[in-house]
Image (cartoon, rainbow, N blue to C red):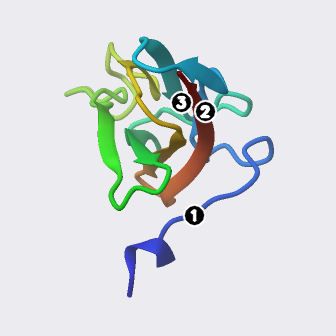
Amino acid sequence: MKFAEVMKTDDWKTEKHVPVIDCPDTVKAGEKVAVEVGVGNEIAHPNTTEHHIRWIKLYFMPENGKFAYELANFDFAAHGESVEGANKGPAYTEPFGKALIKLTSSGTLLVTAYCNIHGIWENSKKIVVEA
């Protein structure tokens, strides 16, 4: 089995598990750009002890590149757990992250997210870098 066989994807407007990438389509070479990633932007994903997004990872694959580069890793550790029981805790972390990045070439941003019940989901977005 290959890793690609376990990845899931779908139209993000109809599926609450697909991670979303929010950033400009075009950026200037070497300038800082904010990239936001999240799950459940349009359709809320549950954030309970039993069903939650555990992590989101952001990568960049340069055009004509051989390898993807990991840009950010967001872990979400609080899902309402408590010594009093499930969903009785005082803290929840939402599946959202923001990274400031600088690029020198065009390519594709790739994002993966892990739901503790429904597995690993992916999405991508092309980004053009202008001189």
Residues packed near mark 2 inside 10 Å, few (<14), some (14 to 19) or many (20 plus): some
Tell me: 98 left or right of 121. left
Tell me: 16 left or right of 120. right
Q: Looking at numbered disc 1 in the image, what kind of residue is underneath it?
A: Lys
Q: Secondary structure at mark 1?
A: loop
Up the image or down, 80 lies above or below 116; here it is above
Q: Indicate the position of residue 39 as horizontal and vertical percent values.
A: 56, 35
Q: Looking at numbered disc 3 in the image, what kind of residue is underneath it?
A: Gly
Looking at the image, tell me whether mark 1 or mark 3 is earlier in sequence order. 1
Of 41 and 124, nearer the camera is 124
Residue found at the very far front of the displayed protein:
131
Of 28 and 96, nearer the camera is 28
Up the image or down, 55 lies above or below 44; here it is below
Up the image or down, 6 lies above or below 90; here it is below
Which residue is found at the position 32% from the left and 20% from the top? 89
Cα separation, mark 3 vs mark 2, equals 21 Å
Whether residue 50 can be seen here: no
Residue that carries the numbered disc 3 in the rendered image: 38
